[in-house]
Image (cartoon, grey):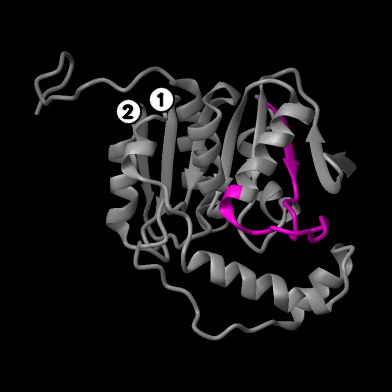
Amino acid sequence: MAYINLRGHQTWSIEHANNGEPLLLLHGGLSATENFEPHILPALEDRFHVYGYDRTAHGRTGIREGFYHFDFQRDEAIAYLEDVIAKPAHLLGHSDGGIIALMVAIKRPDLVLSIIAKGANYSWDADLRLDSQITISEENIQEYTERSPDSLENLEIIIRKAHEVWAHEPNISIAELSTITCPTLVVNGDDEPFNPHHGVDLYQALPNGRLAIIPGSPHATHKIKPHLLYPIIKDFYDHPEQRGPSSPFDEGVSE
């Protein structure tokens, strides 16, 4: 864990060395890698060389001009893949991180081996349930003070900016999603903060997509139902082959 210079910006980076293929963790919005990493790493650490970084204005990485717009965050992820990992990688993103993974695969498919997109909406127009009032808890303040290199007065600016962006972004089209040909697993809880049909539409748009709905789980499936999530993740990586047509009359299937 250390700061790296990512194209002129001090960025907090994490790496778990392993001989496996590279996998990049993309944490959720208004969060940090160290919030996400411990809950998801047990499903990955024996198999992959895991990387993660705190995006601009998140966690231990400071603010800079243009932050929080999804195009900005997508390009930051591409820079990390090109400069730090320096080869194609698997992407596993939660919430905003899942959105960024999809956007990277659309713009730079050559950098993406597979995607797991957890709790990710591809469009802002998904009946998102966002709090109308912005509240900053004592826990938010303490975490920000302990981590961020910026002054506390920036915390409210960051949170307000996030809500402004979520009201109008992302804007990924079905046509763009249909260009993502790498194996992609869409994972949602059954109580996401967006319309459940949105996740199905995302899955159906993907030529090589799979869909998992975790029962009895809200947005943070990795925290609430890891015992259900981990086997699904492992099975996805065990069987990355192209999805084929299904029928009740397939060989070996009986009713």
Identify the residue shown where x is 58% and y is 56%: 223
Question: Which is nearer the eye, 225 or 208?
Answer: 208
The quadrant of the rendering that contains the C terminus is top left
Between 238 and 58, which is closer to the camera in this rendering? Answer: 58
Outermost residue to the front: 65
Placement of 182 over or under 178, stated as above or below: above
Distance, label 1 to label 2, CA atoms, is 6 Å
The quarter of the image holding the N terminus is top right
State the extent of the magenta-drawn residues as a range: 48-71
Horizontal side, residue 128 vs residue 76: left or right: left
Q: Earlier in the sequence, mark 1 or mark 2?
A: 1
Horizontal and vertical percent for residue 20?
69, 19
Task: Count numbered badges in the picture.
Answer: 2
Q: Give the labeled residue for mark 2.
A: 207
Question: Where residue 219 sits: x, y (%)?
Answer: 48, 60
- Residue 41 shows up from this direction: no
Give the secondary structure at mark 2.
loop
**Any mark on residue 254, and which?**
none
Q: Which residue is mark 1?
A: 181
Look at the numbered discs 1 and 2 and tell me whether their residues touch, using CB distance below 8 Å: yes
Magenta highlight on residue 34: no
